[in-house]
Amino acid sequence: MNRHLPIVVGVALLTSLGPWDLGVRVSASGDARQIVAEAQRRSEAKSQRYEGLLRSHEASGKVTEKRWTLERLGSHGQSKSVIRFVTPAEVKGVALLVVNHTDRASDQWMWTPAIERDRRIANQDRSTRFFGTDFSFEDLEERDVDQFSYELLGEDVIDGVACWKVQTTPKETKTSQYTSSVVWIRKDNYASARLESYIKEQPVRRLNYGDLRNLQGIWTAHVLTMTDLKRGSHTTLTLERVQYNVDLQEGNFTLQAIRR
Amino acid sequence: MRPLVLCSRGRCGLVLALLLLCAPVRQLFAQEPAAPPDMAVALADTPMYWLKDTSRTPIRVLETGSHVRIVRREGNWYRVTYSDPRFGDETGYVQAASLRGDNSAAGLSTSPSGRLSQRGFIDARAVGFPQSTVVDDQSVVADFLVRDDVFLKPARWLQFAAGADIRANSHDQVEDKWRVDTSARGVLRPRVSLRRLAMAITTNHVTLDIGRQFIRWGRADILNPTDRFAPRDFLNVLDTEYLPVQGVRSAFQFGSESFEVVWLPSMTPSRLPLIDQRWTAVPPGIAPGLTIRDRGAVFPDGGEQGARWLHSGRFDLGASFFDGFNHLPDIDATVDPLAQSLDLTRSYAPLRTYGLELSLPTSAVTVKGEASWFTSPNSTGEEYVLYVLELERQIGEWVLDGGYVGELVTQSRPGATFGAERGIGRSFIGRASYTAGPRRSVGIEGAARQNGEGFYLKGEYSEALSPHWRLTISGVGLGGQETDFIGQYRRNSHASTSLRLSF
């Protein structure tokens, strides 16, 4: 008979900000998998910390904001992360612990200060929208290069920059709401420029990567805009105070730690 | 019928006073202090030197737009660190005028160390009851609550927490006295109560919480039989709040395993429905005209202790032990023929429980379960196993949760207890919630006794009107037989509206 919570969805984690973050060195290989693998390798960091601002633009024009801090330990499918919501005031103190695995879906727990307890998040349907935004849980999961097969579709220009256009298809071992995705990877620095996700032949979501900056040797998009092509709404995720390879302790990524 | 009273005994003035009191609190916490810029960006191609001397050869030239970390300011110079992607960090001096502070570029530590944080809200609620009961014909009850928690973390390993509630109520559910309650043992809700006053010491593997705090156990959602350190306020039996306890909690975490030990020097009882109000149902068979009187409570001496092991990984599995007192009282009823009254005395029986809890995610559903064996160390109370089994599933924007609460009596003994937990036993339970967008949600929760003698159904719509304001409208339907714990409240169906300002 606990009081019903205003927040009723479980939450995945905003760890990896693109399907594969960014690389620096240009590979001469045209092989799609090598391009993606190199991009992933170049974006590896022991840890990461940032402040995120999520702005949801509803079709009606209303804008909702949420802000949080994120700390991540580890990289690419084997990381642990904690998100702590800072604003709006009603969700201040809500914390999420996500433990990622390469061979299965992540384990997730949410600490809710209003009821002073943690609870495991049911997350069978990863197409569920993250806090009602245009990002789904799956969009925010870390991806590993080995979970997909690749095809180089050709070359394209995004925002005046030459890109490789790579189609990615989840392997049978990987469950996904999407039939396939197309990712545009910049040739100059291996940064992701755009990701378009398809259900059958129909594009359903488009993610644009903007405000690219080189931080501690890792090219990082600071503004990510996800558009729900069916609903006509979009959500912008802005990263602030991004920092890699910070000194984080394993003990910060436990159920005991997220209540503090 | 008594007239509709929203603000009795001049409480309107009190509510206004509380609102005024809260205004400065709100202003105090409305804005968190801005952090000084710890990152900066080069406004033009900027030479960087070993020493603060422009006559020397620069060690490098920062390109326009380069981000640097500020170590400190020294007069007209900044000592900065530039992270070279190829050669690593390099530290030197640049002229202050050539940099612009840029917190958004990249961050130094945003560690909570040294941070003062706060969260709170002001909540105004009106509850309407369309039906009267034998003891209560008040049809509208208004509640007002201000809650604030403050956290200070002077060091990474140390945190202080303090929190308080200030309340007002239109139906005499709150004490008149202005005192700070620290025991939570009163019949009425205190006007001002200390909600939290604790210190937490943390190392990589150990957490020690000392003081007034909340301790919650369990993996299930609608009922938690293992949650023994969590007394509640049952002034509204279907809309309860947890009460804090005072003591020491130590937790040891090693990988996926955690071990928790709790010691409380004294027990904190649950707060029962007021005997002259609608959530106290007059038992069938009581002679008409008999007055019910609260003769107080007998609180036990001695402390409470417990331990819990929890594995959190692919699945959650835990076991717990509790040795203390039942926070739900036994009720001793005696008839005073001279006073024509039924006198009720509360006492708190010794209790020892052994609990198990589980949360197992599968590809189809998450299985959640809890069981606790309630035993009576002095062989005076009934002994039983209370268990919950729930299946939870997320489908699109829906979260569905359904299950069963069961009870198995292992040693039957006579006695009367306020059975808020057992009262939902032998019931089917369910909950469904839907997220309609970033600002709106809808939820339904219900329970129905398997013998059909009692049920409740609760629906709620909640919408954020702005970043700080939230409106919640809810309705509760109750039905059943007067001999059933839920059914006895069949005249307490109600609707409520609350407006909350979070800050």
Image: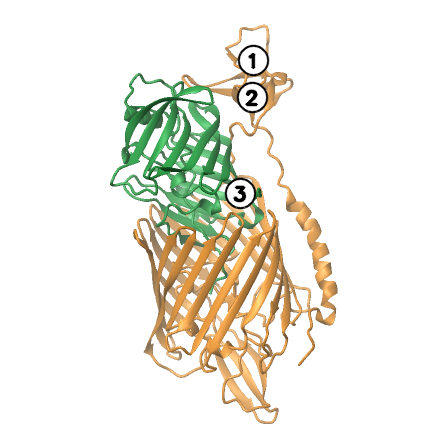
Nearest the eye: B278 or B357: B278
For disc 3, the marked residue is A59
The image shows residue B459, relative to residue B59, as above or below, that is: below
Decide: few, some or many residues near mark 1? Use Cα within 10 Å; few <14, some 14-19, many ≥20.
Answer: some
Protein chain holding label 1: B
Residue B179: x, y in percent?
A: 66, 64
Residue found 37% across the figure and 33% down from its top: A19
B377 on left or right of B184: left
- Disc 3 from disc 2: Cα separation: 36 Å
Question: What amino acid is labelled 2 in the image?
Answer: Val
For disc 2, the marked residue is B41
Chain in orange, by letter, is B
Residue B125: x, y in percent?
A: 62, 63
Q: Colour of chain A?
A: green
Secondary structure type for disc 1: strand
Protein chain holding label 2: B
Protein chain holding label 3: A
* Numbered tag placed on residue B46 in the rendering: 1
Between disc 3 and disc 2, the foreground one is: 3
